[in-house]
Every structure is written in C-alpha cells, then in structure tokens.
Amino acid sequence: MFSDREKVIVEACVRMVLGQLLDRDSVSISDFKAVLYNLNVGSFGNKSYKFEDTNDWVSCLKDMRSIVEALDPEYRRLCESLGSEYFLLEEEIRKADS
C-alpha cells in the first residue's frame, strides 16, 4: 500500500498531531476538528466513514496510537519490554472506566 518512505512520513504526521493533541494545543485541536468536519461533509470527496461528532477529537487518540503501532510494530514491542504505557488524557481514562 505505502512505500517504506511513505510509511515513515505518515508515521511522522500521526505522531506530530498525536503529540500536539495530547499537549492540548488549542490551534491543533481546532485544526483537527475542522479537518474531521470537512471529511464528514465531503470537502475531500466521499468517505466510507462518517464521524458522529466531529468535535470529539479525544475519541480519535486511540485510533492514532493504533496507526502508529501498525506502521511500527517494533515500537510497541519495545514499549512493552520496558513496561511503558501510553499517556492517556483524563477524558480517555474516564471513558474507559464508564
């Protein structure tokens, strides 16, 4: 599907956005929500998936982590071997507990 170079570029993009969202960067959050909205309304063509709430950027964090894992499975194995866990926002923890 992607060349090795493209995989690294996609991973860099996902990691950059994920980091900014986890830092609660207000501009990045606004930009991300705007892109989700534009995807939903067809600004970038028809997509096979529509978000129920394009303001719910927190629900996308798990997916972004999964994308990183898919692009770099060795990274997750390394984290597990070191006993490292993902940083989760309070909203993610509350949602998982409910």
Image: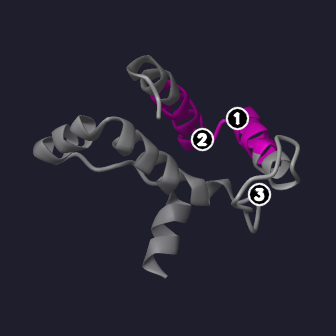
Instruction: Look at 58% across and 54% down and name the residue there.
Output: 60
The local crowd at label 2, few if under 14, some if 14 to 19, many if 20 or more residues have their Cα within 10 Å, is many
Query: Per the image, is 17 magenta?
Result: yes
Q: On screen, 11 above or below 56?
A: above
Q: Which of marks 2 and 3 is nearer the N terminus?
A: 2
Asked if marks 2 and 1 touch (Cβ < 8 Å), the reply is: yes
State the residue at coordinates (38%, 21%): 4
Q: Main secondary structure of the magenta part?
A: helix
* Quarter of the rendering containing residue 52: bottom right
Q: Position of residue 15 (x, y in %)?
A: 48, 32
Residue under pointer 3: 55
**Any magenta on residue 62?**
no
Sequence-wise, the earlier of marks 1 and 3 is 1
Residue toward you, 22 or 68:
68
Alpha-carbon span between mark 2 and mark 3: 13 Å
Q: What residue sits right under mark 1 in the picture?
A: 28
